[in-house]
Amino acid sequence: MKFQKEIDKRKTFGIISHPDAGKTTLTEKLLLFGGAIQSAGAVKSNKIKKHATSDFMEIEQQRGISVATSVMSFEYRDKLINILDTPGHKDFAEDTYRTLTAVDSVILVIDCVKGVEAQTERLMEVCRMRKTPVIVFINKLDRDGKNPFDLLEEIEEKLKISTQPLTWPINMGGDFKGVYNLFNNSIISFTPNQKVTDNDLVPMPDLNVPELVDMLGEHDAAQLREDGELIMGVYESFDQEDYLQGDLAPVFFGSAVNNFGIKDMLDTFVEIAPNPRSRMTDVREVLPAEDKFSGFVFKIHANIDPKHRDRLAFLRVCSGRFERNKFYQNIRADKKLRFNNPYAFLASDKEVIDYAYPGDVVGLYDSGSFKIGDTLTEGEEMNYAGIPSFSPEIFKELVNKDPMKSKQLEKGISQLTDEGVAQMFTQHGGNRKIIGCVGELQFEVIQYRLLGEYGASCSFQHMPYFKACWIKGDAQVIDDFVKFKQANIVEDKEGNLVYLAESEWYLNTERSNNPEIDFYITSDFKHKL
Ligand code: G4P
């Protein structure tokens, strides 16, 4: 229990949302609260975005979307908070899934006008798979949105999680007056763009006092009393254990751009959100307070400085203490590695650190020895269970446009796919490379980066496949199937056999013709079709 104090201090979480719900704005306001950044008007001028958020790559600035994942740390009320940012664009969903393996809890931002959107549903599926505790922030209350009760119902129905409001809005849109905090029974009036402090809370233990009318007016006081009664009737007192189990999501209402409603959430977050938790490996469960260091790489970011082809691997520390200049074992590669300038991430900067503790994310400079999911330990043979690869949705053959640069192309595509930018399959018994992605944008990123970072020029040729299935079975049976369906058989980077199906019909036909073969939808052979 050497590091218990450090572990108790840390809260590592991710913010997820459908694009445009307000994730970036909320992140920036949280950093402001934490004193990690100073300038209050900076969001509008977009200045902070340049420093605080994740635009390491030029392409990201070009497109104005967050392609990368970054980490920001700040202190608040004696806690050290690590925010792992996630890309908002749906084409980079796999990046987000992987980042979710490295957090201990999640804040989910929902736009009150739009309600639960498609991407939010997919992200929540991953949270549910991992039983990640979720806090919901319903944003943009300064706009006329959906009725708050309807919003809660929509969240419960679409995201399959129970909710419990801990603040409640008093009106919305132009008439938005503030929120009632059901946790400490107080009202905070809406003041656009001001930093709320504890002095702004007006205690209101009883909603029936006449002062409520003085404060809100007849109509809004009556509405809040009615809502309050309904909430008391429906919800029991908040059970932190249900939240920690991932069964119950506390809900807060606010307006990120106006810096409103965030303090209530942050104060509750530091109280209830989990500290670094124990994690499963393929051998055993590992506790954060164990003496020996262990951790895993959940993200690899290439070419932070376009002049150098170095990569930054993001390592989540899971147990013990990570130390600078100490040798650690990369279990997959069976290689000892030592890092003489590991980075910690501050809001606008990176700094070299000597130690890191469970819950921390360390940036490790790497010249190509890491793959996504790699586990580092002090020698113990174990691998952290990550998120397996799912079937891509779009398949294209990689075509080399410059024969003089085929080596660069090979190296580039291999490294980019190690980073998890896309999945690469190789024709079985051949050399053709097929790239699988979730969205078209990923192909553009690959093309752009291959040229910019490796000097290799390529194009993509569409392939008529709709799904990849990993196959397993008796050696002879597989052998026969592979011979028979040669054109559709490829290998993933680990050499596993994969069947590419042109359509649902083909897939079903092959499955019924080959009942002895198991078709899997994930690369870890755990989820059968
Ligand atoms: P994202 O990271 O989830 O994609 O969303 P982001 O924070 O970039 O916010 C998307 C848009 O929503 C931004 O406007 C932002 O200012 C606005 N927004 C965020 N919070 C609120 C809120 O509480 N109320 C209202 N009315 N708007 C909010 P934009 O016009 O796209 O960008 P910008 O020029 O304002 O930066």
Image: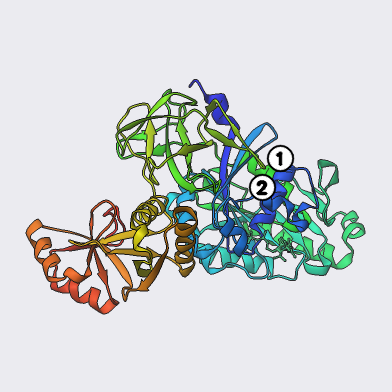
Q: Residue at coordinates 81% horizontally, 51% vertically from top-left?
A: 188
Asked which secondary structure carries label 1, the reply is loop
Task: Name which of mark 2 and mark 1 comes first in the sequence.
Answer: 1
Q: How many marks?
A: 2
Can you give x and y, in whole percent of width and height, for residue 264 in the image? 72, 47
Considering depth in this image, is 359 or 251 the residue closer to the camera?
359
Quarter of the picture for ligand 1? bottom right
**Tag on residue 52?**
2
Q: As drawn, is 278 to the left or to the right of 209?
A: left
**Tag on residue 204?**
none
Q: Is residue 68 visible?
A: yes
The part of the image, by quadrant, that contains residue 108 is: bottom right
Outermost residue on the bottom side: it is 505
Can you give x and y, in whole percent of width and height, for residue 67 in the image? 54, 57
Considering depth in this image, is 243 or 387 the residue closer to the camera?
387
Where is the C terminus found, in terms of image quarters?
bottom left
Q: Amino acid at mark 2?
A: Ala
Q: Residue at coordinates 29% horizontally, 77% vertically from top-left?
A: 503
Of tags 2 and 1, which is closer to the observer?
A: 2
Q: Residue at coordinates 89% horizontally, 60% vertically from top-left?
A: 213
Q: Is residue 125 visible?
A: no
The part of the image, by quadrant, that contains residue 211 is: bottom right
Outermost residue on the front side: it is 404
Can you give x and y, in whole percent of width and height, for residue 63 in the image? 60, 64
Residue under label 1:
36
| Mark 2–mark 1 CB contact (< 8 Å) | yes
Considering depth in this image, is 133 or 500 the residue closer to the camera?
500
Count residues near mark 1 (Cα–Cα under 10 Å), then give few for <14, some for 14-19, many for 20+. many
Up the image or down, 369 lies above or below 469; here it is above
Asked which secondary structure carries label 2, the reply is helix
